Amino acid sequence: MLLDKNRLRWAVRRGMLELDLILAPFLDNVYDQLPTDEQQMFQDLLECEDQDLFNWLLDKHEPHADHQRMVEIILANTGLQICKDEQ
């Protein structure tokens, strides 16, 4: 079941500023255009630990297979893929 946008705003607020700066704009600018199945994938991703999200989004660790597609979507919509490719 998909959460409403207000609950998602709380869910994207994390313990790490770096994650807040990625996830909040993604929610505001991209989430509504995603198909329902990808919206659910995003919500599932938010259940992961901050350290895992940090590693997947900023530190070049490969995400678990069930989160790979959503991490790719987030990276494609943040500009972070450029930074990651240059490292």
Image: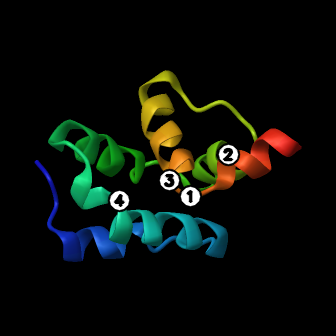
Query: What colouring does the structure picture have?
Result: rainbow
- Graded by Cα atoms within 10 Å as few (under 14), some (14 to 19) or many (20 or more), the crowding at tag 2 reads some
Q: Which residue is mark 2?
A: 81
Is disc 2 in contact with disc 1, using a CB cutoff of under 8 Å?
yes
Disc 4 element: loop
Is the residue under label 2 in contact with that under label 4 (CB below 8 Å)?
no
Residue type, numbered disc 4: Val
Look at 44% across and 71% down and name the residue there. 24
The location of residue 83, given as percent across then percent down, is 78, 51
Give me the C-alpha separation between circle 4 and circle 3: 8 Å
- Residue 17 location, x and y as percent? 63, 75
Q: Is residue 25 found left or right of 11 in the rendered image? A: right
Are the two marked residues, 4 and 3, in contact with CB atoms closer than 8 angstroms? yes
The tag earlier along the polypeptide, 4 or 2, is: 4
Q: Residue at x 27, y 40 (%)?
A: 38
SS category of the residue bearing label 1? loop
Q: Secondary structure at mark 3?
A: loop
| Measured Cα–Cα span from mark 4 to mark 2 | 16 Å
Q: Which amino acid does the dot numbered 1 rest on?
A: Thr
